[in-house]
Amino acid sequence: MQAHIFRGQGRVFGATAHASGENLPPQYGPWAAFKTLELVRGGVQPGLNVVSCLDDIDTFGFHLTDAHVRITEQATD
């Protein structure tokens, strides 16, 4: 899956399948495009838990971290 990575406030990063980042939670923005990665379940990506990222994108449409700590569910409350 192609995941688009965006940088938000502070050390918050978001990953989504949407190239524009339109579905990232606005409370952590503004969002700036950072890079695009090809993620494969079972693969390794430094600084990113690929399984957690792909699971979150499947479930919530995005994956969020703050200083490499998963915060996705905080954004969906």
Image (spheres, grey):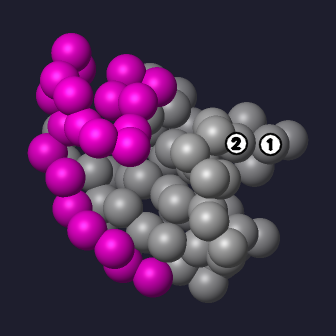
Is 48 a magenta residue?
A: yes
Residue at image coords 56%, 37%: 60
Q: Is residue 21 above or below residue 50?
A: below
- Amino acid, disc 1: Gln
Q: Is residue 52 above or below residue 18?
A: above
> Badge 1, how many Cα within 10 Å: few under 14, some, many 20+?
few
For mark 1, give the secondary structure: helix
Q: Position of residue 75 (x, y in %)?
A: 75, 49
Magenta range is: 32-52
Q: Is residue 38 above or below residue 35?
A: above
- Amino acid, disc 2: Ile
In depth, the one of 30 and 10 nearer the eye is 10
Q: Which residue is mark 1?
A: 74
In depth, the one of 45 and 18 nearer the eye is 45
In depth, the one of 47 and 39 nearer the eye is 47
Q: Position of residue 41 (x, y in %)?
A: 22, 20
Q: Position of residue 73 (x, y in %)?
A: 73, 36
Decide if residue 36 is on the left or right side of residue 11: left
Decide if residue 23 is on the left or right side of residue 47: right
For mark 2, give the secondary structure: loop
Quadrant for the C terminus in the image:
top right
Residue at image coords 61%, 62%: 12
Label number found at residue 71: 2
